[in-house]
Each structure stands twice: as C-alpha cells, then as structure tokens.
C-alpha cells in the first residue's frame, strides 16, 4: 500500500520533516517514491513553515495513496493558508 507520510530530518531538538509518498513497508526515513514538500514545525519569523505540491498530492490521492493523520491535517492547513493568501491578494488589488 502506498502512503503519504512524514520523514524526519534535521538535527537533535530541531526537527524538519519531508512529506513523502512511500511504500507502507519501508522505514520512516527510508526509501521513498516521491517527495511532495516539507514541514518545519519550528519556523521563526519570515521562514516558510510548510510547502506542499498539491497537484502531485492530489495525483497520489487519486491513485489510492493513504495519507497519515498528521499529513491530512497539514493538507487542510496548507489549503486554508492558500485561500487566505488569495483573499489578501484580492483585497490588496482592490
């Protein structure tokens, strides 16, 4: 089964996660099929905390990939942030 889950990177006490499409039998930080983006839970100031290639994520979801609970919540958060940014851009144009 193909899953979409987080793969940990970074150093001790400074986590950084890649959002990856992987076979469910492979280890957490092991081989992956495709990297969809990243999540930085300790982003400060103007640093980008979350980036996801939603087109590729939707492609894999359509092919039956099952996202983990945390990745599903990150997808929702990313969509919400994108909608808010689009609304701010429209009000800035007006």
Image (cartoon, rainbow, N blue to C red):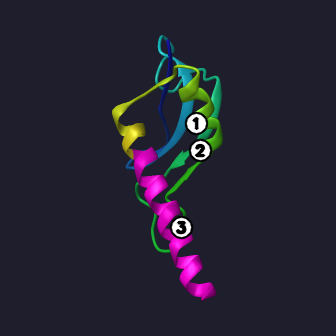
The residue tagged 3 is 47
State the residue at coordinates (48%, 18%).
27
Q: Main secondary structure of the magenta part?
A: helix
Considering only order in the chain, which callout, 1 or 3, is on the residue closer to the N terminus? Answer: 3
Marks 3 and 1 sit apart, C-alpha to C-alpha, by 23 Å
Q: Secondary structure under badge 1?
A: helix
Image coords of residue 31 (percent x, y) = 60, 20
State the residue at coordinates (47%, 74%).
45
State the residue at coordinates (53%, 28%).
61
Circle on res. 57: 1
In magenta segment, residue 91: yes
Tell me if residue 89 comes above or below residue 36 in the rendering.
Answer: below
Tell me if residue 45 comes above or below residue 4 in the rendering.
Answer: below
Q: Is residue 41 left or right of residue 32?
A: left
The magenta-colored residue range is 74-94
Most distant residue in the bottom direction: 94
Circle on res. 44: none
Q: Label 2: how many residues lie within 10 Å, few (<14), some (14-19) or many (20+)?
A: some
Q: Secondary structure under badge 3?
A: loop
Task: Tell me where residue 20 sits by quadrant.
Answer: top right
Nearer to the camera, 78 or 92: 92
Marks 3 and 2 sit apart, C-alpha to C-alpha, by 20 Å
Q: Are marks 2 and 1 in contact (CB under 8 Å)?
A: yes
The residue tagged 2 is 54
Marks 2 and 1 sit apart, C-alpha to C-alpha, by 5 Å
Q: Label 1: how many residues lie within 10 Å, few (<14), some (14-19) or many (20+)?
A: many
Image coords of residue 46 (percent x, y) = 53, 73
């Amino acid at each position: 089964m193909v899953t979409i889950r987080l793969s940990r990177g970074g150093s001790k006490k400074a986590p950084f996660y890649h959002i990856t499409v992987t076979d469910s039998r492979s280890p957490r930080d092991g081989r992956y099929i495709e990297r969809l983006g990243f999540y930085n839970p300790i982003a400060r100031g103007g640093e980008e905390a979350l980036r996801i290639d939603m087109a590729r994520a939707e492609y894999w979801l359509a092919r039956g990939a099952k996202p983990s609970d945390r990745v599903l919540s990150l997808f929702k958060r990313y969509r919400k942030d994108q909608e808010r940014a689009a609304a701010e851009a429209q009000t800035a144009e007006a």
